[in-house]
């Protein structure tokens, strides 16, 4: 039987809600304030906490951090979206506006407890030594709190999700968090990197094929979509999917059916799709490189993964987590970051995002001779003309580009032109007349940084003439 704690200072409301829940087979305790709740009860003993927002003393949202893993629903007399959104940003799983509807409350509670039970079963299956993806996603900045809230909301549905963000920002972790918080958590999640499968094989891999469908098809084979039946399909780098495969994928999304390569009959499947990309699909759709109808099918719910450089103090929290894991993996004594290393990590631009941070820390642990990780051990590509310094220079209205060959009075970035916009314009206007080495030199960056920036912004290199 599920246990619920009610924290409400108005005794009439508290008693009425307690009777309602007890009539529906819940075990209920109640308190009139946060202090009373924490002093009289162990918050971790409950499946759910329902708390008023405004209480004598501490606000009800303080229970979110105090209860840790226990979900908290906030009640508020102010049925405005502002108070509800603020509560969700702080980590509340849901909110109830007073005066509340009994059926709505019971449905909300049942859904939350069911979801929590599914998460607990998944955790038990994998063992306590393997944290779930949502626990691996660390962050307290506003962008991450908004992301966690959106993940929780969309996980309750079967809606198609498009996760966008730079390479290395943790798009697959977000997809796994959605899957594990959904009703499909006990079914398989199949992950596919569209960029890693040859174009000639992608349709066969996704949709399967019949015997004799093409040379080498000696037997029939199920595709990865069939393998995910009842669960979730995660298509990473969906922007790399060939147009013909995009057409097949669109039919799957519209009809819930697939047809193996070489087959006549279609097969019905029940699969939730989550897609991810670092590319601008809307821009690709306008140029015909991505199907516009498929783009709008994918764009039901968008999740934006913030780049690491925009996450402030989150960087240190993530770094500490990676440091502990690397020390355990490599059998090293527990190390710590020097103050200078912490400042460097916060200031650095992190073009490779979380993945680059993880690799830098593992390298530093291998090279460390004492108990401190210093800036030089991180091996970051920091140079006088780095993009981080370039961005700072742009913000002050100056350019690191050499004045030779370019009239800076014409090229100087306008005050409202972003670094990405200026970079893209400069490269497109000059790549026909400059080599990659000269482009990088003019921008005051390394060729590696130039390549990474091209990848991020989707700027192709000029094709070599035959």
Image (cartoon, rainbow, N blue to C red):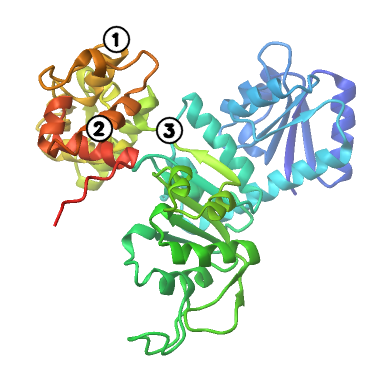
Rendered location of residue 423, percent (x, y):
28, 28
Determine the CA span between mark 2 and mark 1.
Answer: 23 Å
**Side of 1 relative to 424 (left or right):** right
The residue at the point 85 percent across, 33 percent down is 18
Q: How many marks?
A: 3
Question: Is residue 280 among what the camera can see?
Answer: yes
Numbered label attached to residue 440: none
Q: Which residue is mark 3?
A: 306
Which-is-in-front pick, marks 3 and 2?
Answer: 2
Q: Residues within 10 Å of mark 3 (few under 14, many from 20)?
A: some
**In the picture shown, does residue 113 fall above or below 346?**
below
**In the picture shown, does residue 413 fall above or below 359?**
above
**Side of 427 relative to 89 (left or right):** left
Q: Which residue is mark 1?
A: 396
The secondary structure type at the circle numbered 1 is: loop
**In the picture shown, does residue 229 fall above or below 63?**
below
Determine the CA span between mark 3 and mark 1.
Answer: 24 Å
Q: Which residue is mark 2?
A: 429
Of 126 and 355, which appears nearest the observer?
A: 355
- The quarter holding residue 106 reads top right
The quadrant of the image that shows the C terminus is: bottom left
Of 24 and 313, which appears nearest the observer?
A: 313
The secondary structure type at the circle numbered 3 is: loop
If you read the primary sequence from the N terminus, does the residue marked by circle 3 or circle 1 appear first? 3
If you read the primary sequence from the N terminus, does the residue marked by circle 2 or circle 1 appear first? 1
Q: Residues within 10 Å of mark 2 (few under 14, many from 20)?
A: few
Determine the CA span between mark 3 and mark 2.
Answer: 29 Å
Rendered location of residue 316, percent (x, y):
33, 26
The secondary structure type at the circle numbered 2 is: helix
Task: Check whether the beta carbons of the residues at disc 3 and disc 1 lie within 8 A of each other.
Answer: no
The residue at the point 63 percent across, 25 percent down is 63
């Amino acid at each position: 039987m599920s246990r619920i704690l009610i924290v409400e200072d108005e005794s009439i409301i508290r008693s009425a809600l307690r009777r309602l829940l007890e009539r529906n087979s819940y075990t209920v305790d109640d308190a009139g304030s946060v202090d009373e709740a924490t002093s009289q009860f162990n918050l971790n003993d409950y499946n759910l906490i329902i708390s008023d927002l405004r209480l004598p003393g501490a606000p009800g949202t303080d229970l979110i951090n105090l209860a840790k893993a226990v979900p908290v629903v906030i009640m508020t007399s102010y049925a405005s979206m502002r108070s509800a959104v603020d509560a969700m940003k702080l980590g509340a799983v849901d909110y109830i506006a007073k005066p509340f509807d009994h059926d709505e409350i019971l449905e909300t509670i049942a859904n939350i407890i069911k979801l929590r039970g599914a998460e607990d079963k998944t955790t038990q299956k994998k063992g306590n030594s393997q944290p779930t993806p949502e626990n691996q996603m660390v962050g307290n900045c506003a962008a991450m709190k908004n992301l966690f809230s959106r993940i929780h909301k969309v996980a309750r549905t079967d809606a198609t999700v498009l996760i966008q963000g730079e390479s290395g920002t943790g798009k697959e972790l977000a997809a796994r968090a959605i899957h594990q918080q959904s009703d499909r958590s006990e079914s398989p999640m199949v992950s596919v990197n569209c960029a890693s499968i040859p174009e000639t094989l992608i349709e066969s891999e996704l949709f399967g094929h019949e015997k004799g469908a093409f040379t080498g098809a000696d037997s029939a084979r199920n595709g990865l979509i069939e393998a995910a039946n009842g669960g979730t399909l995660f298509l990473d780098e969906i922007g790399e999917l060939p147009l013909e495969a995009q057409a097949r994928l669109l039919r799957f999304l519209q009809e819930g059916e697939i047809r193996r390569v070489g087959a006549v009959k279609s097969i019905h499947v029940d699969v939730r799709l989550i897609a991810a990309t670092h590319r601008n699909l809307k821009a690709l759709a306008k140029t015909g490189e991505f199907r516009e109808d498929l783009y709008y099918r994918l764009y039901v719910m968008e999740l934006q993964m913030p780049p690491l450089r925009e996450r402030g103090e989150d960087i240190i929290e993530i770094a500490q987590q990676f440091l502990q894991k690397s020390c355990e993996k490599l059998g090293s004594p527990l190390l710590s970051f020097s103050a200078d290393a912490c400042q460097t990590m916060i200031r650095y631009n992190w073009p490779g995002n979380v993945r680059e941070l993880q690799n830098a820390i593992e390298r530093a642990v291998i090279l460390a001779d004492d108990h401190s990780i210093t800036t030089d051990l991180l091996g970051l590509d920091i140079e006088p003309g780095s993009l981080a310094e370039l961005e700072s220079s742009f913000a002050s209205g100056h350019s690191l580009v050499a004045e030779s060959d370019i009239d800076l009075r014409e090229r100087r970035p306008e005050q409202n032109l972003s670094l990405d916009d200026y970079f893209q314009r400069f490269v497109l206007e000059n790549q026909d007349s400059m080599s990659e080495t000269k482009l990088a030199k003019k921008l005051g960056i390394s060729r590696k940084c130039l390549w990474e920036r091209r990848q991020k912004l989707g700027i192709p290199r000029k094709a070599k003439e035959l």
